[in-house]
Image (cartoon, rainbow, N blue to C red):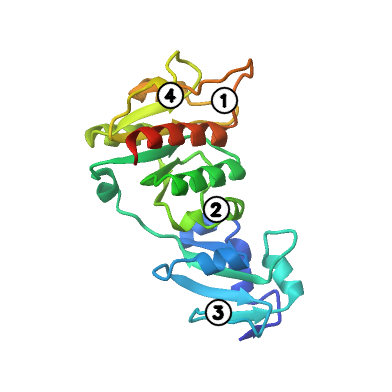
Amino acid sequence: MFIESADNKIIKQIVSLKDKKTRDETGLFIVEGEKQVNDIPLNWEVKYAVLTDKNAKINFSHVYYTTEKIFKKISDTATPQGILAVVKIPDYNLSEILSLQTGLFIIIDSLQDPGNLGTIIRTAHAYGVKGVFISKNSIDAFNGKVVRATMGSIFKVPIFRECDTKSLITEFKKNKIKTYALALETDKFVSDVKFEKKVAVIIGNESKGINADILKTADDVIKIKMFSEIDSLNAAVACSIAVYEISKQNNC
């Protein structure tokens, strides 16, 4: 089917999915760009794809074509590639993830920058993190900028959204997962800690860090060792270093 009008219901739905409220209501999100669309796992539910190239070969049941002008209206990038897909946000089994015998987990609390979250999800993929848990007051993992920043890793790591961080930490403790808050309010360095086989790292807001209540709820507080007088590291960089150190020690 060729879409010729910006008033078409498919075009309107895609535009609306740029808003988190609509993503929450529909359970759908947008994947844009040739590489990202081709990276969508075969077992994920793709509702439909929209392309500008009629000759492009793509293996989805429902494919629509449109003009470059209309595609620019639905695209979230400065230089659209003329391909996107609308995909069902996957559901993961929390109990199954938390009951794993070993594993590293990441808890995101109040993070706001899409690039930071995308980088953290890429790091999680690289080091075999078993799940990324994102608080209600953080940027949405299925925001278009976050999805693109993950470079396809969004499809490889279980993502849990809209989490209540304090309640989540309580659940982690019940499942014998020790939680470590990554913050400056400690003398304990990541590189000096002997970690358990089930570990969760908590990452806070870019400027404010981790909420004081969360720091009290976590089992321990750790920080990155630095060799100059810089105040702090970027949230995604700090997370990546911590995840590397823990993974290196636990081989998880």
**132 with respect to 151 (left or right):** left
Report the disc number at residue 58: 3
Q: Earlier in the sequence, mark 2 or mark 1?
A: 2
The residue where tag 2 is placed is 20
Distance CA(mark 1)–CA(mark 3): 44 Å
Measured Cα–Cα span from mark 2 to mark 1: 24 Å
Q: Residue at x 25, y 50 (%)?
A: 96
Q: Amino acid at mark 2?
A: Lys
Q: Amino acid at mark 4?
A: Ser
Q: Residue 227's image quarter?
A: top right
Tell me which numbered mark, 2 or 4, is placed earlier along the sequence.
2
Location of residue 216 in the rendering, given as x and y in whole percent from the top left corner = 38, 20
Q: In the image, which disc is placed on residue 191?
A: 4
Amino acid type, residue under disc 1 in the picture: Lys
Q: Secondary structure at mark 4?
A: helix
Instruction: Report the quarter where the N terminus lies.
Output: bottom right
**Disc 4 residue crowd, few under 14, some 14–19, many 20+, Cα 10 Å:** some
User: With respect to residue 150, does 235 lie above or below?
Assistant: above
Q: Name the residue at the right extreme.
A: 69
Pick the residue in front: 164 or 243. Answer: 243
Residue 15 image position (x, y, % from top left): 63, 64
